[in-house]
Image (cartoon, rainbow, N blue to C red):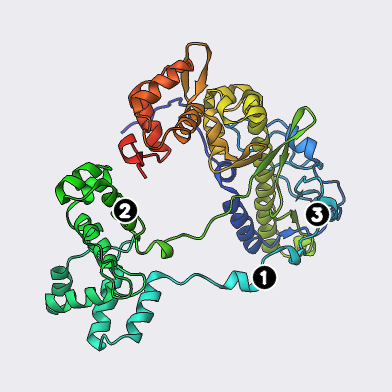
């Protein structure tokens, strides 16, 4: 063992810096939840219900957007977050103007119309009925029918297990022998109950595969399909139906091609996913973090702070500062925590605006003319433009949305690889996807474009692209291959 002296460099992540980085990468709903949680935990934080209650004016939108961000390797912003000069390790001295200090540390969203708004706009929110209801699940719907049917006590227990084994599409994920072994009943009993469940609503729920699903629907007692050709196609030719090989079906069944078309129409009217109506998730509406609005010939970047609580430091605890040492220490600690939260939120908002303005500068053609004019852009371009690190830009653009004249987009949408063109500047990959989608939308449905034909059409427009790249983009767009897109009737 010995003692020696070494020099080394390391990044010290203070709790305050960690909080700033955490806030930077949070989505808007997560930020609102975190602020609500801090309001509950920190007694010195309070929500300002009215603008103009502080001794100092809140930060204006111009100051908030134009402020220079602090370097990423420092634990605190170099500029004060409010109009009052406050340092990270400062709290008001005894006898100081406590109320003025508390009022100056306040986060007020800089929205233009916030001067006359309060948080008591209950009439704009959803009714209480809308917040308490929820859609009935598939399991609840099926078990309600099972209890109304003659399944018996043991049968209801087995049926409940079968219902729990259903996939989101409504298919049974375990075989009858497996269920029988687990529950200690006969395979015949399980098969019988599966057949009974398949006749419930929705019809064919609990099928093992697509063929069984369609067969149960074709033989349902209330609306059976009498055409033997339909049954023959379901039993033997679903693979030909998938690739639109109607001629093979006609040859094997000995029926005319027109008859095959008519039978196919009947099958296409059936539901291949019986649980479709119960598998729809509740839509999550996107609230943009920032707006890009066109005013005349210029675009204006505006923060969206609607719904984000307006924070300030409460002055209710000023008497406790000079009375009890432990209370004083606790209040000082909570003061620093509240101060850092307010500062971190303000720095987050400034950074979002700076990144959005930079994107606007690089992608102005997109905002003017649409997705087909999207330019190649990488994180490094924006990072160099606003003098920040790429990791900061990456955090800012993740799960952040912008409302533009072209629609609502995630900030990540504007970063794309480039596709070379023979006529000039490179084109963004998203713009190429848009062009492929438009070509497919305008194609002849009886003779859809193959991937190679799409390559040729794009090359005629000066876009140099490989066939495998077209196939990858087509799959990302959720478009089937040309053989599966073909429609003859």
Along the line of sight, the residue nearer the viewer: 255 or 70: 255
Locate the C terminus by quadrant: top left
Residue placed furthest toward the top: 423
Return the disc, 2 or 1, that comes first in the chain's sequence. Answer: 1
Q: CA distance from mark 3 to mark 2?
A: 89 Å
Q: Which residue is mark 2?
A: 262
The image quadrant where one finds the N terminus is: top left
Mark 1 and mark 3 lie on one chain; the one further toward the N terminus is 3
In the picture, the disc for residue 94 is 3
430 sits to left or right of 111: left
User: Which type of secondary structure does the marked residue at label 1 adopt?
Assistant: loop
Is there any visible trace of residue 424 in the rendered image? yes
Please tell me which residue is depicted at 27% across the width and 61% down the height of the picture: 214
- Cα distance in 3D space between marks 2 and 1: 49 Å
Q: Which residue is mark 1?
A: 127
- Residue 104 position, x and y percent, is 81, 48
């Amino acid at each position: 063992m010995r003692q020696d002296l070494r020099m080394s460099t390391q990044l010290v992540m203070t709790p305050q810096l960690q909080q700033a980085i955490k806030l930077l990468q949070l989505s808007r709903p997560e930020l609102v939840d975190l602020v609500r949680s801090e309001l509950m935990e920190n007694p010195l934080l309070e929500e300002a219900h009215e603008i103009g209650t502080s001794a100092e004016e809140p930060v204006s939108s111009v100051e908030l957007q134009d402020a220079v961000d602090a370097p990423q390797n420092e634990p605190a912003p170099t500029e004060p977050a409010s109009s009052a000069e406050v340092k990270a390790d400062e709290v008001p001295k005894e006898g100081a103007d406590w109320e003025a200090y508390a009022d100056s540390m306040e986060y007020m969203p800089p929205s233009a119309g916030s001067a006359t708004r309060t948080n008591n706009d209950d009439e704009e929110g959803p009714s209480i009925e809308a917040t308490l209801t929820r859609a009935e699940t598939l399991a609840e719907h099926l078990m309600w029918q099972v209890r109304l049917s003659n399944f018996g006590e043991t049968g209801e227990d087995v049926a409940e297990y079968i219902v729990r084994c259903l996939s989101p599409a409504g298919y049974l994920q375990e075989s009858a022998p497996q269920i029988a072994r687990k529950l200690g009943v006969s395979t015949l009993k399980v098969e019988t109950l599966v057949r009974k469940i398949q006749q419930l609503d929705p019809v064919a729920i609990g099928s093992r595969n697509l063929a069984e699903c369609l067969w149960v629907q074709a033989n349902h007692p209330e609306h059976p399909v009498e055409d033997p050709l339909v049954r023959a196609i379901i039993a033997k030719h679903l693979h030909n139906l998938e690739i639109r090989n109607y001629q093979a079906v006609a040859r094997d069944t000995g029926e005319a091609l027109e008859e095959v078309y008519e039978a196919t129409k009947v099958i296409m009217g059936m539901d291949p996913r019986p649980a479709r109506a119960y598998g729809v998730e509740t839509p999550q509406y996107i609230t943009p973090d920032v707006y890009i609005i066109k005013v005349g010939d210029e675009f204006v970047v505006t923060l969206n702070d609607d719904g984000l609580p307006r924070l300030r430091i409460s002055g209710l605890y000023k008497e406790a500062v000079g009375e009890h040492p432990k209370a004083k220490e606790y209040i000082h600690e909570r003061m620093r925590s509240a101060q850092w939260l307010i500062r971190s939120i303000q720095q987050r908002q400034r950074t979002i605006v700076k990144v959005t303005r930079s994107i606007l500068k690089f992608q102005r053609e997109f905002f003017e003319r649409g997705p087909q004019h999207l330019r190649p852009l990488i994180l490094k371009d924006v990072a160099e433009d606003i003098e920040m690190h790429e990791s900061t830009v990456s955090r800012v653009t993740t799960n952040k949305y912008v409302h533009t004249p072209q629609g609502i987009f995630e900030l990540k949408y504007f970063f794309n690889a480039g596709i070379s063109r023979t006529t000039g500047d490179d084109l963004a990959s998203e713009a190429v996807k848009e062009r492929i989608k438009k070509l497919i939308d305008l194609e002849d449905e009886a003779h859809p474009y193959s991937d190679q034909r799409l390559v040729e059409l794009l090359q005629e427009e000066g876009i140099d692209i490989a066939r495998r790249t077209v196939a990858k983009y087509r799959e990302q767009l959720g478009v089937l291959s040309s053989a599966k897109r073909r429609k003859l009737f």
